[in-house]
Image (tube, rainbow, N blue to C red):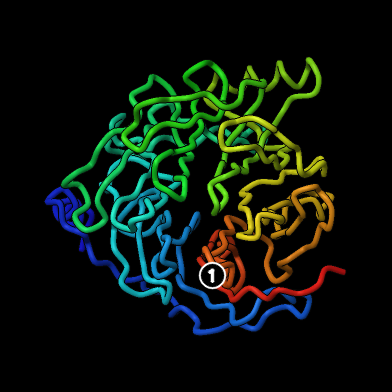
Amino acid sequence: MDRREALKVVLGGAATMLGPPPARAASASLTTDPRERRLANVRQLTAGGSNAEAYFDTSGTRLIFQSTRAPFGCDQIFTMGVDGGDLRLLSTGRGRTTCPFFFPDGKRFVYASTHLGGQACPAPPDRSTGYVWPIYPSYDIFSDDAAAPGASLGRLTDNDGYDAEAGISPDGRRIVFTSLRAGDLDLYTMAADGSDVRRLTDRPGYDGGAFYSWDGRHIVFRASRPDTAEELEEYRALLARGLVRPRRLEIYLMHADGTGVTQITKAGAASFAPFVHPNGQQVIFSSNLHDPNGRSFALYLVNVDGSGLERITWAESFASFPMFSRDGTRLVFCGSRNAASPREMNVFLADWVNVSSR
C-alpha cells in the first residue's frame, strides 16, 4: 500500500490493519544479560523502524505506541496486542504525532499531533551546535475512538503554542500535560473533554513527561530546572527558537493537585520517562547517569525517597519509556537491544521479577 492509498483508508475513518515492516520477525523470547535479575521472559514485539512510547491499556491486553514506518515519514500512533499482533494505525497519517495514552475504558485514547499545522512532517531541529529536542508550536492534544479512528477525532487544546505529553488519570477524569501557554514549559491538568484547565507547576524550566500513579494519588514527571542565571538565559534563548537541550533532567513526584513536589533523583544526568510502580513506593525511569559521555541510557529503579537506586537493563545502548502493567507483573519498554541498524528501536515486554534490593 503506498502513502496515498494509506491516507485514503485513514481519512475514510477506518482502522488500518498494517503488518510490521518487511524485516526480521519479532522474537518470542530473548536472552537477557545475567545482571537483569528483575526481567524474565523478555519478548520483542516489533521488528524494524523506530518504535517508542508504548503504554498499556488498563486491561493489560493492548499497547498504544508511536512509530516511524512506511509509508509515513515521521511518527504516527499505532495499537497492537501484547503479543505484537493485531497492529492498527490510529492517528490521521498527517503531521507528526507523539505521546499516546488510552482512557481507562480502552476505547478512547489521546495523543499530540501537528497535523493542523500542516500535513507534512515538521522540519527536524538544527543540531549543529548540540543535541536538542524540538518544541513544535503546532502540537495540540486530541482524543479519538480506537474502534473508528478519525470518526470522532476531537481537539482538546486550542492554544497558540506547544501542548503535548498527555497522561490520563486512572479514573479517566483528568489529563496531565505539558504546555507553553504561559511562556514556559509547565505541567497542567484538564478535564477529559479539555475544559477546566489547571496549572500545576510554575518554576522556570522544562516540566514534562508526566504520568499519574496507578492509584491516581500522585504525578511523576521529569524536569530541567536551570540553577544559574547563565543556564536560565540559555534555556530561554533556546525556547524562543522552539528548542530545549535535555542535558540535565531530574525525576520529581507530587500530589495529583500539584502540591508536595519532591525531587527524587539528584544525579545531574539526563533522567527521564519515569513511571510509578503499582506499589506506590518505587519509580522506574531512563537515565545516562552511568555513562560519563552521556550517550547510553538504561532503565533504573529507585525508591520515592531517592534511596535504593538500582540499574535494571544492561543489554542495549538505549532503553527508555518503561511502564508497569496495573498489577505490576509486567514491564513494557522500548530500546535498541537486538537492533539490526544503529537507529532501530523496538518495543519489548518482560515479566517483572520482585527481588530483594541489594
Image position of 22 with respect to 134: above or below: below
How many marks are shown on the rendered structure?
Answer: 1
Residue 242 horizontal/vertical position (percent): 52, 25
SS for dot 1: strand
State the image quarter where residue 336 is shown: bottom right
Q: Nearer the viewer, residue 344 or 77?
A: 77
Q: Nearer the viewer, residue 203 or 30?
A: 203
The residue that disc 1 covers is 348
- Is 96 situated left or right of 154 in this image? right
Image position of 243 with respect to 101: above or below: above
State the image quarter where residue 224 is shown: top right
- Is 34 situated left or right of 193 in this image? right
Looking at the figure, which quarter contains the C terminus? bottom right
For label 1, the crowd category at 10 Å Cα-Cα, with few meaning under 14, some 14 to 19 and many 20 or more, is many
- Is 266 situated left or right of 155 in this image? right
The residue lying at 32 percent from left, 52 percent from top is 72
Residue 335 horizontal/vertical position (percent): 59, 63
Residue 301 horizontal/vertical position (percent): 73, 59
- Is 164 situated left or right of 33 in this image? left
Instruction: Please state which amino acid type lies under the numbered disc 1.
Output: Phe
